[in-house]
Amino acid sequence: MKNNLALTMTALGTILLAANANAAGFHLREQSAAAQGNAFAGATAGAENGSYAYFNVAGLTRQKGTQLNIGGTYIAPRAEASNVRAADGSRGADVNNIVHAAVAPNATISHQLNDKAFLGVALNVPYGMITKYDRDWPGSDHGITSKVMTATVTPMFAYKATDKLSLGAGLQMQYVKARLTGTSNGGAVSTAMEGDAFDIGYQLGAMYEFNENTRVGVAYRSQVKHKLTGDLTASMPLPSLNQDIFAKLNTPEMLSMGVFHQINDKWSVMAEYQRVFWSSFKTLDIHGQEYPFLSSTKEHWRDTNFFAIGASYQIDHQWKWRLGLAYDQSAVRVQHRTPRIPDSDRIWYSTGLNYQYNDRLSFDLAYTYIKAHDAHLDTELTSNIGSHVTAEYTNSVQLFGLSLNYKF
């Protein structure tokens, strides 16, 4: 019984770490249509509207009066598994549309208390994904469906310490919900696991303005230490597996640095570097009501780097054009890649427009195409439990961002 249970729990080690093609791991960087237009280059220093506070809360000191930003990104990924082969060498059907489309909304409202102090509240969806295979694909015991949703509300405070230096802090109040399905015993048993949690982290930021044209920013987002509670259900012939479960999981901490420079009335340039500390997630221990310790899964994730450069061109007093290029490193090496994590390095190509309708109202549009490197999967390298499957993955994603900015 316990061996069967360990088999069903193998994939739970990735319940919040199954990746799609748009960012390393399960991080959704798409929190600002304006910043997306520059491939998030200079996001930590840009502070062009309230949405940039997700990347650096200190930037709120550039949002005068009371301002509202509402936006969202439509994420249209495409992930395909080809040349799928089972342990006996037989060819399985290619799997199309593994990663499903989703919308990531965001909103920020900020208010200037006085010349130095600023308040804000942000709503973001910083992590999430949906992957789904056919039930009869050769790797079904490694995973069929993976669905993760998060929602984070962040109250923020920023303070202008000097004419040049701004400091800020925020409290991440984060809810996460996950569902994972798969099979065991050669496909004879279907399993489903669900869990959720609400926990708190924090963010810190600083921005230094050398002059009105040049500024730099640095920001830190802490881990959010989640304890998911939920249940495991299994079909016949193993209904006795049904029980309550819980698992501890930490989202990664992040350190970001950015620079923004206004060259002249027309051109501005920006750059960004981010380090995501995925290596802090070393193992995932699963506990149950019936069995105190069900399994321990080694994840072997590594810290990742994100690099971006961008430029903006002020076409006239109403229109601004943005463009950007980024490189995003995978959190998973080839020897640790799984069907739930067909992750690989990726290149971002972004462009966008800002339209200033009047002194109070403006709009941002953004489009990004992300091309991920082809990924080879061999489960014999990643797991000693479950079937042996090999496949070749081709991943890409298109992002469509839109936001409205209003100054009261």
Image (cartoon, grey):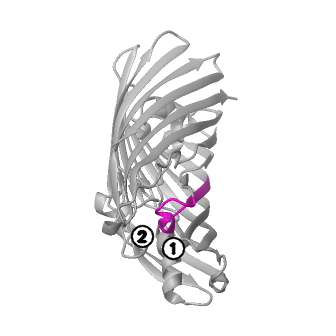
Asked if residue 263 lies left or right of residue 296, the reply is: left
**Crowding at mark 2 (Cα within 10 Å: few <14, some 14-19, many 20+):** some
| Vertical arrangement, residue 374 with respect to residue 401, above or below | below
Give the position of the N terminus as an image quadrant: bottom right
Label 2 vs label 1: CA separation? 8 Å
| Count of labels in the image | 2
Give the position of the C terminus as an image quadrant: top right
Give coordinates of residue 209: x percent, y percent.
38, 34
The residue under label 1 is which amino acid type?
Gly
Boundaries of the magenta span: 135-153
**Crowding at mark 1 (Cα within 10 Å: few <14, some 14-19, many 20+):** few
Asked if residue 381 lies left or right of residue 7, the reply is: left
Give coordinates of residue 207: x percent, y percent.
41, 42
Give coordinates of residue 224: x percent, y percent.
51, 64
Foreground of the two, 101 or 142: 142
Foreground of the two, 109 or 331: 331
Residue at label 2?
A: 387
Residue furthest out toward the top: 316
Residue, x 33% and y 19% (percent of image)?
263
Residue, x 49% and y 78% (percent of image)?
7
Under circle 1, the secondary element is loop
Give coordinates of residue 135: x percent, y percent.
57, 60
The residue under label 2 is which amino acid type?
Ser
| Vertical arrangement, residue 4 with respect to residue 52, above or below | below
Foreground of the two, 178 or 314: 178
Residue at label 1?
A: 186
Query: Is residue 284 covered in magenta?
Result: no
| Vertical arrangement, residue 296 with respect to residue 269, above or below | below
For residue 91, the mark is none
Snapshot quadrant of residue 391? bottom left
Instruction: Note whether residue 133 is visible.
Output: yes
Instruction: Note whether residue 160 is visible.
Output: no
